[in-house]
Image (tube, rainbow, N blue to C red):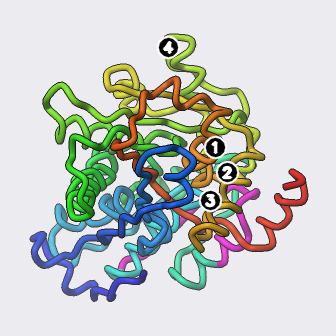
Amino acid sequence: MALDPVPASSAAATSSELPKTYIETPLIHSAPLSNIVGCTVLLKLELLQPSGSFKSRGVGSVVRHALLNSPPGSDLHFFSSSGGNAGAAAAEACKRFGYPCTVAVPESASPRMIQRLREEYSATVVLHGSVWREADAKLHELMKAYEGEGGKAVYCHPYDNPVIVEGNGTIVPEIIDQAAQLGYTSDKIKAISCSVGGGGLFSGVTTGLQASYPGEHKPTVVAVETVGANKLYQSLGAGKKVTLSAISTVASSLGANEVSDKAWEMATSYPTVAVEITDADAVSACLKTLDNHRLFVEPACGAAIAPWYEFEKYEISEKIKLEKDDVVVLIVCGGSTMTLDALVKYQQVFSL
């Protein structure tokens, strides 16, 4: 859902004059998943954000925050390193506000995403390296050169920034208010399920819940990763933060080698259940979500949905004691890196 552009000349240092980079997305009931799980399952449709994912909340807020804290008309250039949704969110916000954006992506980035960055969001795209860290290192070189020429560079990290956490946390009061409108009081919300990459969404959800539920009742966060990118799952098992030596998953948006310090802090202080799923089940969840809800999502998003379609396989009922009148919210975080051809290919690879 595109937002109206805001001319650069109108970007002023007051929040009332500079609109938010995200929208309030719908919260809908899922009859198929509710039947499987045995309680009410609601879907929070973050794939409808302007950039196609929840990143519009956090990464988009980094762009807005920089503008709010700079003199009107400042000559800013934004730099993002991401082959996926974070880069799209930064570029979308920059285009809307009328500022240039450079996005460094690994050479393995989706051709569709590269095309979107260039054609839809008018971003400068730099391909470098085979993984995000290498692209990020190149981005910092570009930033240093730009500032050496007298420019003002603003760095947009994909997930590790307090502004990102705060922005992503805005999803929680929305969920609570919308659930109430559907007839479900906040005390009935038993769990929220989200995918974990670097931990920006997870950190936002847990901090938002912590603020919204100061009492004894606190909804559990089900943090889902694929086996080839299971750094939080391994970290909680080891009792210390683990850094993966390599990433191997079709859910490329989850491909951070480690979670942020904030995500690790929240995982060890807020009620969290970490679940690792197979790539096949992530893709299967994408197909089922398309069939059941007419929603087209990417495997990184399918990851958060998969354990609920495979409720018994992943022993969710043993990890969270759900009752019939409980409510579970699944964050349908995005789908902008996926194409129909790619989904069909994965369907054939995994014989689904």
Tell me how far mark 1 sits from mark 2, CA to CA.
Answer: 5 Å
CB under 8 Å between discs 1 and 2:
yes
> Dot 1, crowdedness within 10 Å: few (<14), some or many (≥20)?
many
Please tell me in which quadrant of the rendered image residue 352 appears: bottom right
Count of numbered circles in the view: 4
Mark 4 and mark 2 in contact (Cβ < 8 Å)? no
- List the residue tagged with mark 2: 252
Within 10 Å of disc 3 (Cα), the crowding (few <14, some 14-19, many 20+) is many
Q: Going from the N terminus, do you reach mark 2 or mark 4 first?
A: 4
Looking at the rendered structure, the kind of residue marked 3 is: Gly
Dot 2 amino acid type: Ser
Q: Are marks 3 and 2 in contact (CB under 8 Å)?
A: yes
- In front here: 96 or 351? 351
Sequence-first disc among 1 and 3: 3
Q: Considering the numbered disc 4 on the image, is that residue within a helix, a strand or a loop?
A: loop
- Magenta stretch encompasses residue 170: no
Question: Helix, strand or loop at disc 1?
Answer: loop
Residue 100 against residue 79 in the figure, above or below: below
User: For mark 4, what is the residue?
Assistant: 240
**Residue stretch rendered in magenta on the structure:** 99-115
Q: Label 2 to label 4, Cα distance in Å?
A: 24 Å
How far is the residue under mark 1 from the one under mark 3?
10 Å
Q: Find residue 242 and name its label.
A: none
Which residue is found at the position 61% from the left and 34% from the top? 257
Residue under circle 1? Answer: 255
Residue identified by numbered label 3: 83
In the image, residue 109 above or below residue 215: below
